[in-house]
Image (tube, rainbow, N blue to C red):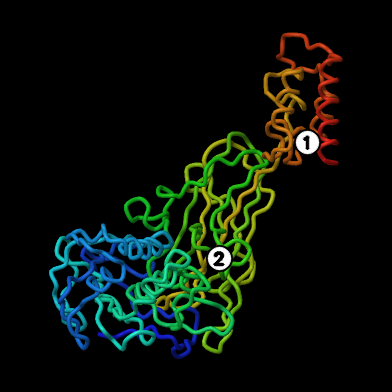
Amino acid sequence: MLLVAALAVVAAGAAAEAYEAASRWTTTSHGSTGEWGDPAAVRWSLVPNGTIIGGQGPSDLIAKLDDYFDVTSPTGDLTTRPWFPIFQQSFDRWEELSGLTFHYESNDDGGAIGSSGSPSGQIGVRGDIRIGGATIDGENGLFGYSYFPNHSDMVLDSEEESLFTYAAIDHRQFRNLLMHEIGHGLGLEHVSSEDAAFLLDATLSVQFDGPQHDDLLGVHALYGDRLEKTFGGLGNNTVSTSASLGALAPGGVLEIGYGAGENPLTIDANATDFVSVSNQYDYDYYTFSVEAPTTIDLVLTPLGGVFDMGGETVDSRAASNLELSLIALGGSLVLAEAKSAPTGAAESLLGYELTQAGDYFVRVRGFDLTNHHSEIDGAQLYGLRLTSEATAPALPGDYNGDGFVDSADFTVWRDTRDSSVSPYSGADGDGDGVVGAGDYTVWVDHFGQALPSASHSVPEPSALTLLAVSGVFLGRRRAQHA
């Protein structure tokens, strides 16, 4: 059983490549977890005071935390402690970013931890990841250490009172310590970068909150992205278990995977929209619908960046060479595919005409870069964006869709002016995506017109209506010069 390097206030040795995955959980209290990239369910528990920790003595973590957080009347339910949410939030963050599901195990029988002979997790008895604490070297030295799967017990230095109780930024220092150690318990080793900040660096930092880009790549390689947990753990790996992107409206956009925004190496504490192919055997399927024939653009972009890792340059956009496929209604016929762009570049299908309304599918996969079946490619984050061509309405200016251009359409325009909408939807008569002056002009130019099937006559704009319009623009001009 290998011990992970302890988290200290000084950096550990350099890593040679992007994320260092030592191992993964293969069996937990919930059973077998499958292969690399498959989802897993893991239980965690807090060992009772007095539990023997090899090399450190009996655990006193619960007693020390109660003292530090002024718990004067403790009960047997640890979830009522003021410090418990810090642990829960730390496991929750890893869960919402990956194919992992964590369960708090309220029972722990106090079996000794700290050796290869430590008891395995068992539902209703003890967690798979068991957390204890004792004096390691006192404050401001080693904060804690963890074991790799399938053992993964965590030991914290229970003397770190100032670290545990520092409440700034929602206890970020304590949470980052816990999330770092949980990362080891999932199978990730220390990394070291000169120009990027990652949670699994051996130096504890509060400059970010939780797992960052390289940490995300590591956990996706081991357990897949969050969509791998869907359909009872089957994931979006087939047409029948496709992840729904929703309805693609004319002029609309559907996208997934852009949780990091414009800086893909930095992950905000609340960001969750991240998807990846965990290796060359991972297929991701998505479904979307259109209500009428339309022309669409599909763009698949590998996400990441260039950064130092252990003295070597890593380009995380080029871990896998992505392939994009558009699949017809029914899910069997491939209508078009794109795979000619070089590794690290976007693949696209532009101007493809969908001739029927209904549900279509998109498949994302990664080419085998190793050219060797026994070797595993790295995880590749990506963003997928679908755009539908905006279609001008049959009757411009008919903003309420009743087949007539009349004063009722002016009311729609007036009540929604300055709002952003999908091109040509609502009162966007000129298709620029914003309800504004140009759309009023479209209404005026088509006032009184009707679709061939319309039956009632439409009057010319009244002086009162035009006066109201004049007042709208006059009010706008005055407001702009106020």
Residue 243 located left or right of residue 80: right
The residue tagged 2 is: 322
Residue 445 located left or right of residue 58: right
Q: Is residue 335 visible?
A: yes
Callout 2, which amino acid? Leu
Residue pictured at 52% horizontal, 43% vertical: 246
| Within-10-Å neighbours for mark 2: few <14, some 14–19, many 20+ | many
Q: Nearer the viewer, residue 98 or 298?
A: 98
Quarter-of-image position of residue 308? bottom right
Mark closer to the observer (1, 2):
1
In the image, residue 342 sits, relative to residue 252, either above or below, namely below
- Residue 342 image position (x, y, % from top left): 63, 71
Residue pictured at 57% horizontal, 85% vertical: 194
Q: Nearer the viewer, residue 369 or 426?
A: 426
The residue tagged 1 is: 436
| Within-10-Å neighbours for mark 1: few <14, some 14–19, many 20+ | many
Quarter-of-image position of residue 421? top right
Locate the C terminus and report the quarter of the image it occupies: top right
Q: Of callouts 1 and 2, which one flags the residue occurring earlier in the amino acid sequence?
A: 2
Locate the N terminus and report the quarter of the image it occupies: bottom left
Q: Nearer the viewer, residue 75 or 145?
A: 75
Q: Nearer the viewer, residue 272 or 414?
A: 414
- Residue 132 image position (x, y, % from top left): 24, 75
What element does badge 2 sit on?
Answer: strand
- Residue 430 image position (x, y, % from top left): 79, 36
Marks 1 and 2, how far apart in space?
Answer: 41 Å
Callout 1, which amino acid? Gly
Q: Residue furthest top?
A: 456
In the image, residue 244 sits, relative to residue 402, either above or below, namely below
What element does badge 1 sit on?
Answer: loop
In the image, residue 440 sits, relative to residue 240, either above or below, namely above
Number of the label disc, if any, that sits on residue 245:
none
